[in-house]
Image: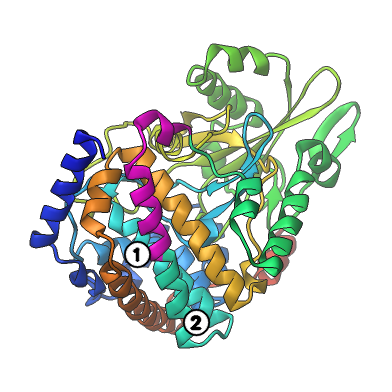
Amino acid sequence: MSTVSAAQTSRGRARRQQVPLAGHAEPGNIRRDPLPLLEASSAGRIARLVPLRYGRMLVSPFTFFRGAAMLQAHDLAGTPCSGIIQQICGDAHLGNFGGFASPERTLLFDLNDFDETHPGPWEWDVKRLAASFVLAARTAGFSRHSADEIVYRLVRSYQRWMAHYAEKGAMQVWYDRISYERLLDSIDDEHAREVLGREMKKAQKRTHERLLPKIGSKVEGRWQINDELPSLFHIFGENPVFGAEERKMLLGNRQALAQQLYGEYLATISISHRQLLERFSMQDLACKVVGVGSVGTRCLVLLLTDEQDKPLFLQIKEARPSVLAPYVPAGVSPYANEGQRVVVGKRLMQAFSDIFLGWSHAGGHHFYFRQLRDMKISPAIERYSPTVMALYGELCGWVLARAHARSGGFAGEISGYLGQDDEFASALVRYAAAYADQSERDYELFRAACLSGRLEAQSEDDFVAAMTGAL
């Protein structure tokens, strides 16, 4: 062990005296009404899409948890903190891990959503991940023992890999990547290898060229994105989602919006990638409704093509202040543009980030750019057995440890704090179960508010019917 690594480990051990590991079992600031926090998080979103957001959250306690990151952020502020503050994901639930292509076209497994990234306590990411696995396990009908075992193995994996990265140099950690081939080599279970192999094959087919004929049509020599409610529709033209005031806020017309966003964005990427984009011309711009927690934010898809009529899809996603911002001990983000906050967080935590990552703003809103669906795949966790789910948890623990070691440079200190025994893992098993209980209670209050009419929730079908009837 190097002198620097030994000093970090020693500092980490010393932190255990002030913040004992067993204290991490505490669920935090849970004596609060979830509804005002949830309603506050809907402020500033596209009003007509908020009922769809609530409808997606209403499906189960797990989908509610996914869409209610602000509740756990509030609650985590009352939990013990080792005092090690660094860049964290902010929303590290199990659905925010998956596969995507590196610039060299290698399929990597990594964190893939950073809307809430912010400097904060590393423990917060581990706790959100652990609680998400318990809720997913309960949704799948797994036993309490299975859920506990999944969390235990996840946290122990995080602990082992953090100790591994503590022994590596800064550049070794920075260049480390977790490819799907590397994952396959690390798995002994034959069934799990088959599941992973199938997901790899699916991802390799998710390219822009395959996507274009599925969501676009050529009209009079120009490609257009097809309207397909509730996921895709045009901002300008006939649709009841955006009112006149909203369109005016977004610069009044498609061409002005695209040019404003695109022009500023180009200045935030490298010269070489800017020159690459000069080989493409804009074809169309449409609105895309994504995820659960992001529903109601302004998310656009920009379609470009090159001289050979080959497509490039760029996703332009609104970046709102992180849900962590009011609660983290380190204060506000240093970036004036929230899109820049997201981009910097992605570049710090991901092994390889999209070459087209950049940021912009328009109509008082902040945005970030990235490629849309470039060999991206989310694991089909709803079909996992307890055994496969436990292996997936170990992989997520590995990825999160790598991301934290990379973004903060505190692997030695975190590893020293965690130690080698299972005290932290045991505490997180208790925390995850207690917080899943709290999320289920919050879900019931949310469900009652939807049934009473305090909150309006719409299913996908109801939303489409309402939109179609309003045309």
- Where's the C terminus, which quadrant? bottom right
Foreground residue among 61 and 11 = 11
Q: Is residue 385 magenta?
A: no
Foreground residue among 71 and 300 = 71
Most extreme residue toward the front is 1
Q: Distance between the residues labelled 2 and 1?
A: 18 Å
Q: In which quarter of the image is residue 275?
A: top right
Q: Mark 1 points at which residue?
A: 127
Main SS of residues in magenta: helix
The amino acid on which the numbered mark 2 sits, given as a three-letter code, is Ser
Proximity of marks 2 and 1: CB atoms separated by less than 8 Å: no
- Tag count: 2
Q: Is residue 173 magenta?
A: yes
Q: Residue 321 carries which label?
A: none
Q: Name the residue under label 2.
A: 146
Q: Badge 1: few (under 14), some or many (20 or more) residues near its Cα, within 10 Å?
A: many
Residue bounds of the magenta highlight: 155-175
- In the image, what residue occupies the spot 70% across and 66% down? 190
